[in-house]
Image (spheres, helix red, strand yellow):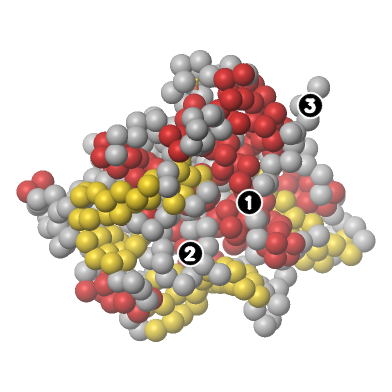
């Protein structure tokens, strides 16, 4: 399929160029959405500013913190470093899409509450989405693996020990003494 | 970010055509480096040509016993591919030492080759930088240069000085494995040895590599020998994970008993490209695989190294890292978890 959005914008005089909007269809948490957005809208901004899904957080906006982690076809990515227009036929899952239809929480959400795996909570949606991705990937077998493979999510409050407790519990991984 | 147009061609030929017609356009793979640089106004492409739907994601065996890694296979899919894990564990280990799981899920093998330096002055548009703005000077030379290069730098002419490093981990293993980059362009296909893919800054620090206008990387070929028995990627950095290398070593050894029959060593974090010296590797052939024989190899690899103040520690660090990396490759035991 050949997809083309908007005419080329003159770079020399970028500030004078009119934002060229295009139609982008995103499937977010199982629901198809049609947006009129410019190609330079990141997936993170599309979720937060256009779809009002503000659970996904903007920490650094440069791939350095993981607060913006969402799942694309089940795989975790940093939504700040990708464009919405690149994902028009992908399944996007954000923190808002993890709970069950009846409102009961995803086991990881429950475990984060049970283990007090946060303080301010800013990194938490990204941590939980990242942990869902971690489980889907199936590479983590030990607590050390969980620590290493959750290293893309920074927690400024330092809730790491409790985050590891929550994730290892849900994964059924024995804690090292 | 500057305004830009977006297109998603459905064939390699049309992708090349689009770039030839609009030279200010850029391909986008995972976007993890390009979008970052666009947010800082360092890259300002007129159009993004999204190559993600091109059929370049496969990892397939080659008739000569090698392996072809599609340019659009992600770093994660490459590192976890069963054939890569079994036959090129050095590459798998190296990729997994880089970035974060999220980034590796996005980053493509092609894009990884093209990632640009993490030099702070390159990123700061208010500072002089010969790489970003040729002829403007080098902010790093007399600035804070702790992460900068100690080998192959260009520092004699202020207008072409550059002491930046290439930040990739993956490329260091590819250099050690003597991978070959497959390129397609308006004039057809060609292959480039890893050793010739990236370049030293010389008089033109604005060029990181030898790709020509309109060209696209389609695959990276690994030769049959994966050094899968004795290998090691040692990455030294400021925190245990999710940080770029200060110094890294990709090592592969072939042994008969305890005698080295073949050795490959490439260094990361020390130069504008992965650093290899075949004379250093040859020093090991026929020798016993013991630390006393690794030290002269380290000296040879670091020959001509030059520190710029904050980064001078890298010279000794690199020498010790080489000895340790080779020692660990022999025993296949890591001194500390990586
Ligand atoms: C916070 C952070 C930490 C990181 N840590 C590490 C680390 O520790 N180690 C490490 O090695 N890397 C690290 N990285 C860098 C990461 O590995 C690279 O950004 C990534 O590999 C780039 O691949 P991409 O597909 O996203 O490239 P893109 O950003 O899509 O593209 C990069 C460039 O390559 C060009 N390009 C892409 N594909 C092709 C192709 N097939 N042919 C021709 N040109 C092409 C594009 O035009 C662009 O100019 C880190 C990145 C971030 C943001
Ligand atoms: S080291 Fe290279 S990239 Fe860094 S400021 Fe100097 S010229 Fe620019
Ligand atoms: S906001 Fe995306 S990684 Fe920090
Ligand atoms: S809970 Fe505050 S940043 Fe993690």
- Answer with the quarter of the image where residue B111 lies: bottom left
Chain of residue at mark 3: A
Mark 2: secondary structure: loop
The residue lying toward the viewer, choosing from B308 and B109, is B109
Q: Which residue is mark 1?
A: B94
Q: Residue at x 65, y 78 (%)?
A: B62
Question: Looking at mark 2, is its residue's CB closer than 8 Å to ligand 1?
Answer: yes
Look at the numbered discs 3 and 1 and tell me whether their residues touch, using CB distance below 8 Å: no
The answer to whether residue A109 of the structure is visible from this angle is yes
Q: Nearer the viewer's eye, disc 1 or disc 2?
A: 2
In the picture provided, is A39 more to the left or to the right than A71?
A: left
Q: Is residue B16 above or below residue B206?
A: below
**Camera-side residue: A167 or A64?**
A167
Estimate the x, y position of residue B198 in percent, counting from the top left. 47, 62
At mark 3, the secondary structure is loop
- Residue at image point 38% right, 38% down: A62
Q: Chain of mark 1?
A: B
- Label 1 neighbour load within 10 Å: few <14, some 14-19, many 20+: many
Residue furthest left as drawn:
A16
- The residue lying toward the viewer, choosing from A15 and A170, is A170
Label 2 sits on residue: B72
Q: Chain of mark 2?
A: B
Q: Residue at x 76, y 27 (%)?
A: A175
Question: Does mark 1 have its CB less than 8 Å from ligand 1?
Answer: no
- The residue identified by callout 3 is A176
The answer to whether one can see residue B327 in this image is no
Left/right placement of residue B27 relative to residue B98 reads left
The CA distance from mark 3 to mark 1 is 26 Å
């Amino acid at each position: 399929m050949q997809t083309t959005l908007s005419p080329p914008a003159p770079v020399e005089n970028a500030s004078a160029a009119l934002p060229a909007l295009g139609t982008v269809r995103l499937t977010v948490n199982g629901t198809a959405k049609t947006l009129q957005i410019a190609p330079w809208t990141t997936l993170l901004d599309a979720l937060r500013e256009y779809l009002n899904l503000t659970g996904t957080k903007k920490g650094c906006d440069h791939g350095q913190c993981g607060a913006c982690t969402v799942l694309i076809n089940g795989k975790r990515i940093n939504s700040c470093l990708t464009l919405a227009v690149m994902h028009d036929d992908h399944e996007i899952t954000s923190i808002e899409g993890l709970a069950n239809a009846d409102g009961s929480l995803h086991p990881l959400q429950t475990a984060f509450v049970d283990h007090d795996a946060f303080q301010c909570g800013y990194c938490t949606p990204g941590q939980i989405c990242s942990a869902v991705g971690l489980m889907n990937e199936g590479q983590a077998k030990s607590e050390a693996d969980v620590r290493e493979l959750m290293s893309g999510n920074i927690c400024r409050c330092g809730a790491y020990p409790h985050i590891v407790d929550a994730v290892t519990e849900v994964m059924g991984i024995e804690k090292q003494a | 970010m500057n305004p830009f147009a977006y297109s998603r061609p459905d064939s390699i030929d049309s992708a090349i055509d689009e770039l030839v017609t609009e030279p200010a356009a850029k391909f986008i793979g995972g976007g993890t480096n390009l979008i970052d640089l666009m947010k800082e106004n360092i890259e300002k492409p007129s159009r993004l040509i999204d190559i993600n739907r091109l059929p370049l994601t496969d990892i397939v065996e080659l008739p000569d016993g090698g392996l072809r890694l599609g340019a659009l296979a992600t770093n994660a899919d490459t590192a976890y591919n069963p054939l890569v894990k079994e036959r090129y564990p050095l590459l798998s280990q190296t990729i997994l030492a880089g970035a974060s799981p999220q980034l590796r899920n996005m980053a493509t093998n092609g894009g990884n080759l093209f990632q640009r330096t993490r030099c702070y002055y390159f990123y700061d548009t208010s500072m002089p930088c010969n790489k970003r703005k040729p002829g403007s000077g080098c902010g790093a030379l007399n600035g804070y240069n702790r992460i900068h290069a100690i080998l192959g730098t260009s520092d004699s002419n202020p207008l072409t000085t550059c002491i930046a490093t290439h930040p990739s981990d993956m490329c260091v293993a590819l250099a050690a494995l003597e991978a070959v980059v497959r390129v397609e362009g308006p004039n057809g296909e060609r292959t480039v040895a890893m050793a010739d893919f990236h370049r030293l800054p010389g008089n033109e620090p604005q060029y990181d590599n030898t790709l020509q206008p309109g060209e696209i990387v389609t695959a990276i070929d690994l030769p049959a020998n994966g050094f899968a028995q004795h290998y090691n990627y040692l990455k030294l950095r400021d925190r245990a994970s999710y940080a770029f290398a200060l110094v890294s070593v990709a090592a592969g050894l072939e042994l008969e008993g305890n005698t080295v029959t073949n050795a490959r060593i490439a260094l990361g974090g020390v130069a504008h490209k992965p650093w290899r010296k075949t004379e250093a590797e040859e020093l090991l052939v026929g020798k016993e695989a013991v630390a006393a024989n690794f030290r002269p190899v380290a000296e040879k690899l670091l020959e001509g190294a030059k520190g710029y103040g904050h980064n001078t520690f890298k010279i000794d660090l690199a020498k010790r890292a080489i000895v340790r990396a080779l020692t660990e490759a022999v025993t296949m035991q890591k001194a500390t978890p990586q």
